[in-house]
Amino acid sequence: MRYSIFVLIVSFVFFAMLCKKSCAAETISKLDSDKTLIVNGKRFFAIGIYYIPKSEKPFQELAEAGFNLVKCGKREELDAAHENGLKAWMSFGDRLDLSRDEEKQKEEIRKIVNEFKDHPALMIWESMDEPAWTWKKPWKPRASAEGLAQGHKFVKDIDPEHLLWINHAPRNTWKTLAKFSQNLDVIACDVYPVISRDIDAENTYAIMLNGKQTDLANLTISCVGEYIDKLKKAAGSKQAVWLVAQGFAWDDKLFPTYQQMRFMAYNAIIHGVNGILYWGTQAMPQPSQHWTDLKKVVREIADIEAIITSPNISHNIKKDYKEMGYSIDAGVEVMLKQYQGSIYMITANTSVGPAEVTFSELPFTGESVQVLGENRSVNITSDSFKDKFEPYGIHVYKK
């Protein structure tokens, strides 16, 4: 009898350990050779949100909208995320700066990691937010780059099965961003370019005296892609890049429109981003047209996630623009993807004005291309085709 009870106990303990290992395995995330995220063995484009919606079933609402990643702060939120098929991230805040109170910080970090690392929803940890920059003193970092590097290594040492990411302000040189992003898997930048003209620049956090949050020469919403280029330079060959996108109005009045949010998402995708997270939605009325528009953009991106994470195709597509009375700078940007035997041509008009473009020297042939989501196709003539774009317009073609 005692032997039977002993065997039963041992079997139960073994089963519990096996279950725990199996659950933990769900959370293993890594980067592929092209820096695409791999989660549960599948290529993964992060579509995330910082704030849980204001509804009766918020996690279900996120999943139905197309989000696949959400910030969580406690076990109950992780449980709800998992129940709805969502992955989650948790933040360490400034604890990872080990230049101060090292032993105390390590103790707190280890406690957090041990408490949550085996939860099946947890996909990635977050480091300190915007460590290299201080409001009104942009040259002054808020943390020690060396201390953060030590903190990042410590987390990776005690939890090698999860990724670690950091978000930067749209400031600083790329070399500084790289310095503050050591021992990480993903680096991001928050870019919020939709701002009212009459904003109180002196007293609004993160706004410069010129009334802008972004600091590039390009002050239009197409600066998003340029910040992704900057991040990629800082990331080098071993780190993925995310965009933290605008989900709020700086003065609670001028929210990004559907067209603006859609353009900024595709602008980032074409420039090679590996994920998009929306910040500020806690200040967005819900329900509202603004919230509906954001979810519409998310749903569209989620529906083509497999295309976005598929291999790029190198191309030399030429573009010839019809004169429409507007200057052409970057013009219509193009990304080519190959997925399940089809070629997808993702395009975005970066111009403030409309454009009519003839695309030639195509890497495919045929009579026409299908335009996804628009219930139409475009004829191919003499190995080229032309199409019209609204300002900041998007078309995705399938051949």
Image: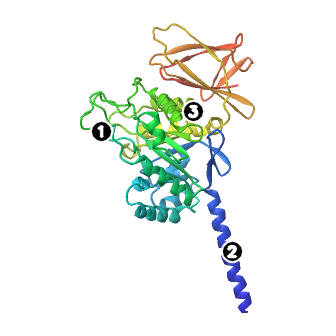
The crowding category of the residue bearing disc 2, from other C-alpha atoms within 10 Å (few below 14, some 14 to 19, many at least 20), is: few
Callout 3, which amino acid?
A: Gly
Distance in Å between CA atoms under marks 1 and 3: 31 Å
Please state the horizontal and vertical placement of residue 9, each as a whole percent of the image: 67, 82
Q: Is residue 189 visible?
A: no
Q: Which residue is mark 1?
A: 137
Determine whether, in the image, residue 293 is placed left or right of residue 7: left
Instruction: Locate residue 202 relative to residue 108 in the image: left or right.
Output: left
Point out residue 397 in the picture as x, y percentages from the top left corner.
64, 25
Colouring? rainbow
Counting other residues with Cα less than 10 Å from the Cα at mark 1, is it few (<14), some (14-19), or many (20 or more)?
few
The tag on residue 14 is 2
Residue that appears at 40% across and 23% down? 217
Name the residue located 55 percent from the left edge and 30 percent from the top edge: 271
Residue 357 percent across, percent down from the top left: 58, 14
Residue 395 visible in the shown view: yes
- Picture disc at residue 250: none
Q: Could you tell me the amino acid type at mark 1? A: Lys
Name of the residue lying farthest toward the bottom: 1
Tell me the tag on residue 272: 3
- Mark 3 or 2, nearer chain start: 2
Amino acid under label 2?
Phe
